Amino acid sequence: MDPTSHKNLHQLLHQITQSPYGQSIIIHFKPISFPLIFFFLFLFFLISLKLLSTKSPEIKNLPPSPLQLPIIGNLHQFGSLPHRSLACLSEKYGPLMLLKLGRTPTLIVSSSKLAKEVMKSHDIIFSSRSQNTAAKSLLYGCHDVAFASYGEHWRQAKKLCVLELLSPNRVEYFQYIRDEEVGKLVERIGGESSGVINLNQLLVSTSNHIVGRCVLGEKFKEENDGFGEVTRKAMVLLTRFCVGDAFPWFGWIDVLRGFRAELKACFETLDKLFEKVIDERREKLKMGDDNNGFYDEKDFVGIMLKLQQQDALHYHFTMEDIKAILLDMFVGGTDTTATGLEWTMAELMRNPTIMKKVQE
């Protein structure tokens, strides 16, 4: 640039900065421009990431799918009642459709015939459940039954639960526990002075005590050590939305909103409670249980530890595996049972004729 042009440019800039309009332009431009630049750079980064992650076009025989938006996929098509949103979408796109929930492709099956194909004819293909952040944190890396990947560990863990807790013989053995706890429930309902009761709270408490005594033994009857509260907290966390599961790039949001801290606190509480129960059972196995040196308590945790001690299991279960399976039994047998009973009572109240038949 020649000296004359440089001088003219300098004079022009000086005139702009000295004028009131020029000062206004400069003052307002500085704070706004950088956020805008950052926003467009961030948007460009996301679009580039999306394009780079997209593979070369292939001919795939995929089910029908609604229009997907970048990054969020089909999440924008879910309302406050997801089951109704899915019903509306299935009416338009058919009983088998593919949705993308963030980055997760999800197959939606909405007919009994196709559900049978998925669950029975192709059960091995669809047998493994998606392992979310909460399950990995609370269930010792998904070493349980519900979230473990299909394989030898899952088969042996399921076999152990079925034979030692859910078999007809074991269910019959625990009948006295169910009778006692249901009797207490009836007494509590009958003793309520007011006409309105919180049935959900009573059913959850009863289910929790039944499962607790079957899984952890009679000590749970005397002092449950807060198992009911913390297992219900675990159930809530397992079903809560995690940003990192749908959008891995934004996993740091879960840290900021405290979700990771909640998972850590809940896990530490559960681990301490299970550790306490397991240590007590180990001591009883060593000393006997005042029964001529023979330990004969038939709760689930006692049986698992006894089989492990006698090397009678066909698969090596670590302490973490046992703790994860114990949590499965609590979460799977408490809230789900109480919810089912609550809905049953609601339907009976809506149908007085059927209610009368049940009472008779």
Image: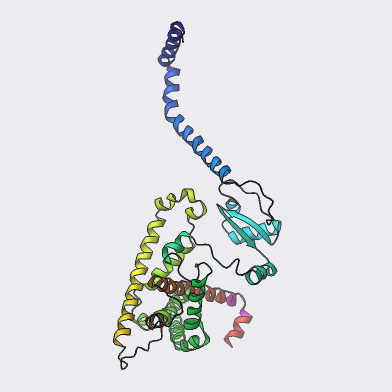
Above or below, 201 against 180 in this view is: above
Expressed as whole percent of the image width and height from the top left, the position of residue 305 reads 38, 80
Expressed as whole percent of the image width and height from the top left, the position of residue 21 reads 45, 18
Question: Which quadrant of the structure image shows residue 288?
Answer: bottom left
Expressed as whole percent of the image width and height from the top left, the position of residue 50 reads 56, 44
Question: Which quadrant of the structure image shows residue 194?
Answer: bottom left
The quadrant of the rendering that contains the C terminus is bottom right
- Along the line of sight, which residue is nearer the eye, 281 or 15? 281
Expressed as whole percent of the image width and height from the top left, the position of residue 5 reads 46, 8
Q: What stretch is highlighted in magenta?
A: 346-353
Above or below, 111 against 77 in this view is: below
- Along the line of sight, which residue is nearer the eye, 200 or 78? 78
Task: Please name the predominant secondary structure of the magenta segment in the image.
Answer: helix
Above or below, 151 against 13 in this view is: below
Q: Residue at x 37, y 69 (%)?
A: 270
Q: Which residue is drawn at 40% across and 52% down?
A: 255
